[in-house]
Each structure stands twice: as structure tokens, then as C-alpha cells.
Amino acid sequence: MHNKSWLRSFVLLAAVAIAIPAFAKPMSKSLPLNHNVHVGKYDVKAGDYNVLIDGNHLTLKKNNKVVAEADGRWEERNAKSDYTEILSDNDGKVLELRFAGNKSAFVLTD
């Protein structure tokens, strides 16, 4: 009976490991901004940045200095994005980030 219990635990652990989404790992990407934007409560000027998304938290860095932070969530889209891009409204408020080759978009909640 001990072997059945061990096997059951192993199968459960394997199922949990498979169920963890790939985007749960922190993601870091280069992100060029062509115009000034608002990320959360921060004004960000055009330039080259590094974006880090860890869980539901976005950090925007320039030259290893944090320039903006915001919270968000991952949402599935119907198709993979062809480009790495930022979607913003008419006032420059960032609504979501899409990454080339990913079917998920990071939607800001701030």
C-alpha cells in the first residue's frame, strides 16, 4: 500500500507541475518607446527600456534604474502577436503590452 500512496503523490505532483503556466516565470524584454506614455502613475519619456514582468507586477527600467511600476494581469488573445508593442489610449496611458510570438497580453490594471 505504501507504493500506491507514493505513486499517487508523484502523479499529483506531476500534474501540478504541468498545470503551471509558462508565463508564471519572470519575463524580461527590451522595449523601445517611440513616444511618451503613462505607465500606472508614472510619466515615461520615449527611449529604450527593459521591461520585467514578474507575476502580476510590471517594472520598467532604463539603464538599470526603475522608472515605472504597475500591476496588471495576463489575458489570452485569439492569435499570437506579430510584434512586441504597447497599446495606449489617446492620452498616452498604456493599456497593455503584447510580445511577439505570444498569445497572451499583459493588461495594466492601474
Image: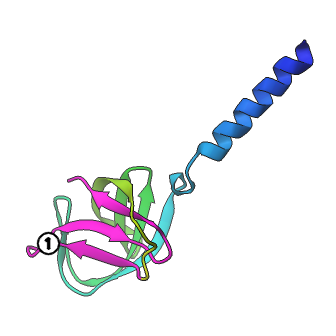
Give the image quarter of residue 107.
bottom left
Query: Foreground residue, 96 or 45?
Result: 96
Q: Position of residue 89 (x, y in %)?
A: 14, 72
Q: Residue at x 41, y 82 (%)?
A: 83
Q: Position of residue 30 (x, y in %)?
A: 44, 78
Q: Is residue 6 above or below residue 89?
A: above
User: Which residues are drawn in magenta?
Assistant: 83-110
Q: Position of residue 80 (x, y in %)?
A: 46, 73
Query: Of all residues shown, which one is farthest toward the front?
Result: 78
Q: Dot 1: what SS?
A: loop
Q: The N terminus is located in which quarter? A: top right
How many discs appear?
A: 1
Q: Residue at x 66, y 46 (%)?
A: 18
Q: Residue at x 48, y 70 (%)?
A: 102
Give the image quarter of residue 44.
bottom left
Magenta stretch holds residue 101 = yes
Q: Position of residue 26 (x, y in %)?
A: 51, 57
Query: Of all residues shown, which one is farthest toward the left?
Result: 91
Q: Is residue 65 above or below residue 76?
A: below
Q: Is 69 left or right of 56, judged from the image as shown?
A: left
Find disc 1 in the rendering and name its residue.
89
Q: Is 73 left or right of 14, judged from the image as shown?
A: left
